[in-house]
Amino acid sequence: MIDKATIKRRFKRSIDTYDENATVQKMIVNHLFSLVDKYTQQLQAGNILEVGCGTGLLTRKLQNRFSYTHLDVNDLVDDMCSKTASVLHLPASACLIGDIETITLERIYDLVVSASTFQWFNAPAMTLKKLAGQIREGGFLIFSTFGDENLTELRTLTGQGLVYHASDEWEKWLSADFELLYAEERQHILYFQDPLEVLLHVKRTGANATATPYSWTKSKIQQFCKAYDRFANERHTYPLTYHPVYFVCRKK
């Protein structure tokens, strides 16, 4: 079971450092938005929901792309949701604070979009079913999550981390209510000068939020840095792997 309180706390700490350090997350947002733009050319998107808006990297693009009636933004972290809504001049009523798995959604949407959020679901099949119930027939669910090689270096060394679901699992869950129009996997590898920079990077982006809390003592950090040497390349830089997966789905 994923500890949502820990996730909320760690992302809240990363609000001020997220945009500066979210290199891969920005690439994911850009590619996801290109898919949104491509597949919704004929869509009259009156009502849009973004799940996990974060600091608004994707929200800005949606706002500029669509002539919507309602653009609702959701985030587990109240400060992130409120700040994004405020900066983008969205009404307070558009800010849906809380866990998308448990909060009540009042509106029926033409488009639901999400970047790098669905990996936090405790009950992905049930939550996809819930979202399907809030999307009109012919509407779209377009999202990215992460595949099973995501942050593999960290998970190998710490024995901690999320259980990332394979693409075929997501496709199976989606098939009940959606027609899958497109699926894609990519891999991005960041390189750092030393293992400590890896830890700082994941802390500054909130990517260190794990299924259960993990305590980084001084001795654990030293052990981690020493063990990370196994991943060093010939240039003596240290990789960190991201494995984004993209889905474009139309409600049956």
Image (tube, grey):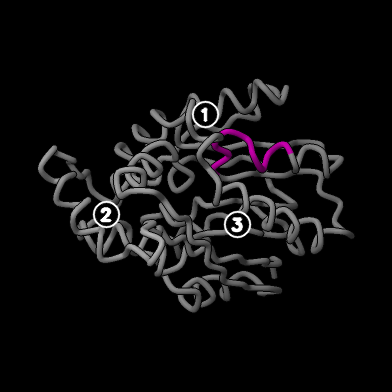
Three-letter amino acid code of the residue under disc 3: Gly
Residue occupying the point 27% across, 54% down: 1
Precedes in sequence: disc 1 or disc 2: 2
Q: Is residue 179 left or right of residue 54?
A: right
Q: The disc labelled 1 sits on which kind of residue?
A: Met
- The range drawn in magenta is 52-60
**Horizontal placement of 143 versus 172: left or right?**
right
Mark 3 or 2, nearer chain start: 2
**Residue neighbourhood size for the residue with mark 2, other residues' Cα within 10 Å, grouped as few (<14), some (14–19), many (≥20):** few
User: Which image quarter: residue 81?
Assistant: top right
Q: Which residue is mark 3?
A: 133
**In this rendering, is residue 246 above or below 207?**
below
The image's mark for residue 1 is: 2
Placement of the C terminus among the 4 image quadrants: bottom right
Q: State yes or no: discs 1 and 3 in contact (Cβ < 8 Å).
A: no
Q: Secondary structure at mark 1?
A: helix
Nearer the observer: mark 3 or 2; the answer is 2
Q: Pointer 1: what residue?
A: 80
Identity of the residue drawn at 60% across and 51% down = 114
User: Which of the two residues, 175 or 197, is positioned nearer the viewer here?
Assistant: 197
Q: Residue 116, position in %: x, y?
A: 52, 52
